[in-house]
Amino acid sequence: MFIGEYQHSIDPKKRLAVPSKFRSELKNKVVVTRGLDKCLFIYPMKTWEEIAAKLGNMPVGESATRSFVRLMLAGATDCEIDKQGRVLIPDYLKDYADLNKNVIIAGLYNRLEVWAETKWNEYKKQAEKNTDEIAEQLGKLGVY
């Protein structure tokens, strides 16, 4: 399980160090893809295989579904985690998420999200304003 918020940086060779506490669960290979809200998702291979199977079986008759599946699957790349625990982020994904040097890695149960630090701070600030409303909606669903 991935939880927590970690400040990291992308080095000049476009490598991102994965927080050490997550490395054993990720093993030596992950999938990095476009996420929602202009971040990247990093999945363990097993989790990605389950998600990709669901996406691959979605009906292609609706344009919004096709578009989402294309972005997620065509945007995905499998990446080796090197001996120092780093993942190489391809340019097209780095550009998609507007990643520069400073990033935030957020653990979200079955995936990691990688955010540009400024975008994460803006997103978090906005979400914190709506905490009561979000909690109320989750309460109606029996989640919280």
Image (cartoon, helix red, strand yellow):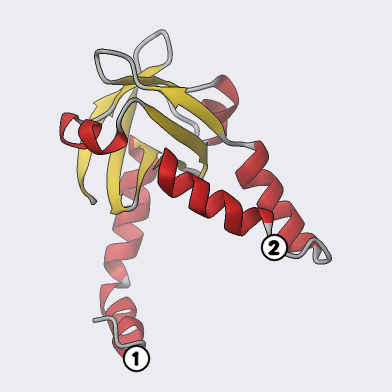
What residue does disc 1 label? 140
Q: In the image, is residue 118 above or below residue 95?
A: below
What residue does disc 2 label? 58
Residue reaching furthest to the right: 61
Task: Give residue 20's quadrant in the image.
Answer: top left
Could you tell me which secondary element the residue under label 1 belongs to?
helix
Left or right: where 104 falls relative to 56: left
Give the x, y percent position of residue 131: 27, 73
The residue under the point 80% across, 61% down is: 60
Badge 1 density bin: few <14, some 14–19, many ≥20, Cα 10 Å? few
Q: Earlier in the sequence, mark 2 or mark 1?
A: 2
Could you tell me which secondary element the residue under label 2 belongs to?
loop
Total count of labels: 2
Residue reaching furthest to the bottom: 140
Query: Hey, what amino acid is under mark 1?
Result: Lys
Q: Which sits in the foreground, 104 or 124?
A: 104
Q: Which sits in the foreground, 29 or 35?
A: 29
Give the x, y percent position of residue 12: 39, 8
Task: Give residue 126's quadrant in the image.
Answer: bottom left
Left or right: where 111 falls relative to 40: left
Q: Nearer the viewer, mark 2 or mark 1?
A: 2
Left or right: where 61 falls relative to 41: right
Task: Give residue 139's quadrant in the image.
Answer: bottom left
- Between the C-alphas of marks 2 and 1, the distance is 28 Å
